[in-house]
Amino acid sequence: MTHRPTILQSAATIRRWGLAALVTLAAAAALTALSLAPPADAAANRAGPAHPTDETAPRDAGDPIMAIVSIKSQRVTIYDADGWILRAPVSTGIKGRETPAGIFSVVEKDKDHHSNLYDDAWMPNMERITWSGIALHGGPLPGYAASHGCIRMPYDFAEKLFGKTQIGMRVVISPDDAEPVAFSDPKLFVPSADALAAAPARADKLAQEAADAAAAADEAKKAATAAARAAATVTPAALQKLQALKTRADAELATTDKMIAAPSTAPRNDQEKARADEYRQKLAAKATDLGTQLDTAKADAQAKRDAAAAAQAALKAAEAKKADAAAAARDAKAALEPVSVFISRKTQKLYVRRGWQSTLEVPIAIRDPDKPIGTHVFTATARSDAGGLRWTAVTIDSGDDAKDALDRIDIPQDVLDRIGSTAVPRSSIIISDEPANREQNYRTEFVVVLNNQPQGGLAIRKPSSDVVAGRDGWFGFGGSSYYPQQQYGYQRQYGYGGGGYYNQRW
């Protein structure tokens, strides 16, 4: 924070230091005025009169469900299940580095964040909405768009909001003013009381089955390892040696038989016959014994090979069962989370995510597929008195109104039953002309960006496809700069340490 000298302080300084102090003070004042002057393009893009400081609704507030940022009005409004609860002015991205309009969610929170892209700039109470570096955070508000793509909020407001929000909170950035309105339609999810009641027990049961399958797979792996090790003890060299000894013994026995039978070498008397017979018996016994050893060794080797093959097959089956059980457990656990649906006119598909997991992707029929449909967010805010859900709709892009857009979508009943029976508050349906944005990945909710609006704030950042798994350390963050004149540059570095899941490549 910058402290300006008061008139009395300035006078005291002049009395103490004389005319030199006056000159120095005047120069400092001139520099301050220059540093506070808005850039020419920012001044030209001011959105009317400055808004008042943050406001709080005159009622008890519930948990925040949605934040809507108006780029036109430079304002953010936070909503719970019953309406707005907080409002504040903001400062979004300057020309060329505009804050992207679209649909996002909070993917990370950091109470005391410092940018690794903008000279360690302080971004307190940071709530990230893209992994490449767009976020809401506390910052200076000159009264016009002045950031490098982030949404700056008043420092006190950012701190207040930080303590209330949850990971996953929807953030809608609209080019114009937008607000949620109450909405109802038969196509919106109607949860089943029986399915909702059974979901926790089912999740517990499948989680235990997954744990049992994992333990069985571990045992199968140990058995397969032991069987493979046993099969390796009977080497080809050992069998070849036995085979050679057996062949040699058979040859010696055959030679002896020939000598006994040949007139020229046959025993001439009873004594020689007795010695020859004794010698032949020893050779025959040796050949028989070696044959037995060879047959036993071959059978043992084959048995061990068969056992290793069977153990490997059992391991493969156990691993498949483990994978299936784990998937079923994940799906059952995800069924306890809000369900998010995205319907894209661009791809003609319906996508489903729960707990950031992609659970379904199916083709969808849209009437008049070449006609713009707009971008709309339908949100289940709370349970209704009748046991269903209360819904709101927000529209942020031109096209049909919310009802007409939903009427153009033909959602198969089996899909509705599958994803709607366990829908809970905070579930949502997004309909848009746009496809999923490059910022969407396996650690985000759906990310939809309006391509008919400037995206400079995203263009200067590396896409989220450049996010790679890491062993430890949350990656760094390149949010908006406090210094509009500062040159930016990509820094391919890994962020500060932490205990997170990713490293960010800048």
Image (cartoon, rainbow, N blue to C red):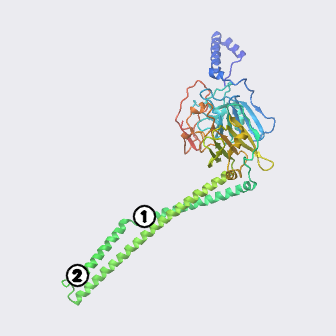
**Toward which corner of the image does residue 159 lie, by quadrant?**
top right
User: Which residue is at the far left?
Assistant: 264
The residue beneath circle 1 is: 232
Residue 260 vertical position relative to residue 8 in the rendered view, above or below: below
Nearer to me, 31 or 161: 161
Going 74% across and 41% down the picture, which residue do you hit?
392
Report how far apart the C-alphas of labels 2 and 1 lie in the structure.
Answer: 43 Å
> On residue 390, which mark appears?
none
Q: Hey, what amino acid is under mark 2?
A: Met
Going 68% across and 57% down the picture, which residue do you hit?
202
Mark 2 secondary-structure assignment: helix
Q: Can residue 355 be seen in this view?
A: no
Q: Position of residue 338 (x, y in %)?
A: 69, 47
Question: Is 314 left or right of 155, judged from the image as shown?
Answer: left
The residue beneath circle 2 is: 259
Q: Hey, what amino acid is under mark 1?
A: Ala
